[in-house]
Image (tube, rainbow, N blue to C red):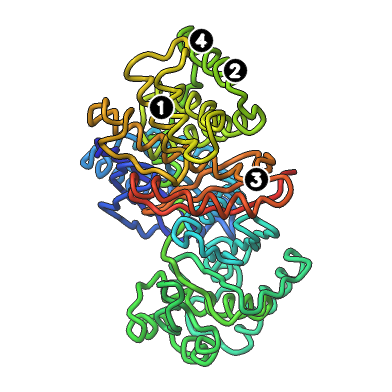
């Protein structure tokens, strides 16, 4: 296992400042180690006066200095600190960011609403894996972010200024909420939904998830049956319990629902907002994955930490090897369209999955060579062509392919499909040491997927984009035409990859533009 990278995410939200520290062993394996929350409500003054007060400057500087000390204590080497709705709207946000940097050394980034939504969305997709939701809702202190998805891609999105702290301060609702006030909140939310989320989606029985502390607290008040292992909020039950929430003052809510003061004072507004949204979208429940912007930030940092930054630059010997391999394959009558496409898909996968496989850069050219040669055994015979191809790769005149590299490439040719598994008695594999056998198996796992993605020999698959979560890899496949046959074979051919990397892999298709 590689040495872990200690990473951190800071979310300066409208209701509180939060820090998460984690150990990342790869883009897939992120282990939370520490969390802190500082109860500073940035949105309280901004949503009325559009500026941070001097008191907020002082408290924020103190919080960030403490976060810096915690990060140093855990040996954090990579971090990202983001600020959302309240800071976006503060007229003195630049001075605020400068103060944080000066007092703590932390670079605070004011992110756009689109970036905030993306981070939350990435966290949800990672948590849900193949079971992607149709809708993601993030109710924060400053805004309500809504993403309507189809096949993991955003179909419709809206950012609506009805966050809980914003409504609390704008409408002056610090305690008991009378029916007329509750109706006012509902009308605000409904009017803005109708103006910003058009055409109106009808999601019916689709899976929807809700993010944020408001949703997590209300899921405890109105729990529903678990969905795909996640807790849920039952909107009909929340609606039934709404009058009890609204009639209580803040102290009574704290006692009745076991929540903090800064959650108790907004939970009535949050409940009205989510009930109104549920009705607008025709939803019955929200799943609660308990992730958000910070988890999205941590995933970005881990992926960046374990991904190759500089482009691959082949030296003269590597370039000669590809030229020599292609020439040899051509003499054996290879199918150039299929072989070259598999080569391109192989290197796309190698580059996209660098954060998972950690293979040395020089392995890439061997993968290319294996892809070019994978079907050359058909010259000898279609039956057992993988064995024939191994023999040709071991014994053919291929300039630049010597000894250990030749054995790895020959092994890739033998194992490029599901007809043969690596075994110690095989001609090429038997000559390799344990480290090189591991490289061969891992490269073969990649080559099998690449070859399967052109199972039809019609070059439908054009691009690939990987996403990572704990225990799984998602591959977004951009295709021209119907690639269903190729994706079915890729699913069947992923077993070696999954075995080598101890992950599950899943595929989803989007049409090429």
How many neighbours does mark 1 have within 10 angstroms: few (below 14), some (14-19), or many (20 or more)? many
| 222 sits left or right of 133 in the view | left
| 174 sits left or right of 24 in the view | right
> Is 480 rendered above or below residue 167?
above
How many neighbours does mark 3 have within 10 angstroms: few (below 14), some (14-19), or many (20 or more)? some
Residue under label 2: 331
Residue under label 1: 410
Res. 294 visible in picture: no
Relative image position of residue 223 (x, y in whole percent):
43, 83
* Mark 1–mark 4 CB contact (< 8 Å): no
Q: Residue furthest top?
A: 316
Q: At 50% across and 89% down in the image, what residue appears?
A: 237
Mark in front: 3 vs 2:
2
Residue closer to the observer: 278 or 354: 354
Disc 3 from disc 2: Cα separation: 24 Å
Disc 1 from disc 4: Cα separation: 18 Å
Sooner in the amino-acid sequence: mark 3 or mark 1: 1
Relative image position of residue 343 (x, y in whole percent):
56, 30
* Mark 3–mark 1 CB contact (< 8 Å): no
Residue under label 4: 320
Sooner in the amino-acid sequence: mark 1 or mark 2: 2
How many neighbours does mark 2 have within 10 angstroms: few (below 14), some (14-19), or many (20 or more)? few
Residue under label 3: 456
Sooner in the amino-acid sequence: mark 1 or mark 4: 4
Sooner in the amino-acid sequence: mark 3 or mark 2: 2
Disc 3 from disc 1: Cα separation: 24 Å
Sooner in the amino-acid sequence: mark 4 or mark 2: 4
Mark in front: 4 vs 2:
2
> Is 292 rendered above or below residue 54?
below
């Amino acid at each position: 296992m590689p040495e872990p990278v200690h990473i951190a995410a800071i979310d300066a939200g409208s209701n509180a400042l939060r820090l998460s520290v984690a150990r990342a062993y790869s883009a897939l394996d992120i282990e939370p180690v520490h969390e802190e929350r500082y109860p500073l409500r940035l949105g309280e003054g901004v949503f009325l006066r559009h500026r941070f007060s001097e008191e907020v400057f002082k408290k924020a500087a103190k919080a960030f200095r403490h976060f810096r000390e915690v990060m140093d204590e855990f040996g954090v080497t990579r971090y990202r600190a983001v600020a959302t709705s309240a800071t976006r709207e503060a007229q003195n946000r630049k001075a605020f960011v400068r103060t944080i940097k000066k007092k703590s050394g932390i670079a605070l980034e004011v992110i756009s609403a689109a970036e905030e939504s993306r981070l939350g969305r990435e966290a949800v997709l990672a948590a849900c894996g193949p079971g992607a939701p149709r809708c993601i809702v993030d109710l924060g202190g400053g805004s309500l972010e809504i993403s309507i998805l189809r096949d993991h891609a955003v179909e419709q999105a809206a950012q609506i200024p009805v966050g809980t702290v914003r409504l609390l301060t704008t409408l002056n609702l610090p305690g008991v909420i009378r029916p007329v006030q509750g109706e006012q909140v509902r009308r605000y939310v409904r009017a803005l939904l109708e103006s910003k989320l058009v055409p109106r989606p009808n999601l019916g029985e689709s899976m929807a998830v809700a993010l944020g502390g408001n949703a997590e607290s209300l899921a405890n008040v109105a729990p529903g049956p678990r969905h795909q292992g996640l807790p849920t909020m039952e909107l009909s039950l929340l609606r039934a319990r709404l009058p009890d929430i609204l009639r209580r003052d803040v102290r009574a809510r704290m006692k009745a629902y076991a929540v903090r003061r800064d959650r108790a004072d907004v939970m009535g507004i949050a409940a009205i907002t989510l009930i109104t949204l549920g009705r607008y979208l025709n939803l019955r429940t929200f799943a609660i994955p308990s992730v958000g912007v910070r988890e999205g930030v941590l995933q970005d940092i881990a992926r960046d930490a374990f991904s190759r930054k500089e482009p691959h630059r082949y030296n003269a010997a590597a370039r000669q090897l590809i030229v020599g391999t292609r020439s040899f394959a051509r003499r054996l009558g290879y199918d150039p369209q299929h072989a070259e496409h598999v080569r391109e898909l192989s290197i796309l996968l190698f580059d996209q999955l660098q954060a998972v496989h950690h293979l040395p850069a020089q392995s890439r050219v061997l993968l290319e060579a294996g892809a070019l040669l994978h079907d050359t055994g058909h010259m000898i015979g279609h039956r057992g062509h993988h064995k024939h191809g191994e023999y040709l790769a071991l014994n053919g005149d291929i300039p630049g392919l010597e000894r250990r590299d030749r054995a790895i490439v020959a092994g890739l040719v033998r194992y490029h499909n599901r007809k043969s598994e690596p075994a110690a008695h095989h001609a090429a594999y038997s000559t390799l040491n344990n480290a090189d056998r591991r490289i061969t198996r891992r490269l073969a796992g990649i080559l099998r997927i690449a070859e399967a993605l052109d199972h039809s020999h019609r070059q439908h698959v054009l691009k690939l984009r990987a996403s990572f979560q704990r225990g799984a890899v998602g591959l977004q496949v951009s295709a021209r035409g119907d690639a269903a046959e190729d994706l079915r074979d890729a699913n069947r051919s992923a077993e070696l990859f999954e075995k080598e990397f101890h992950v599950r892999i899943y595929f989803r298709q989007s049409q090429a533009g």
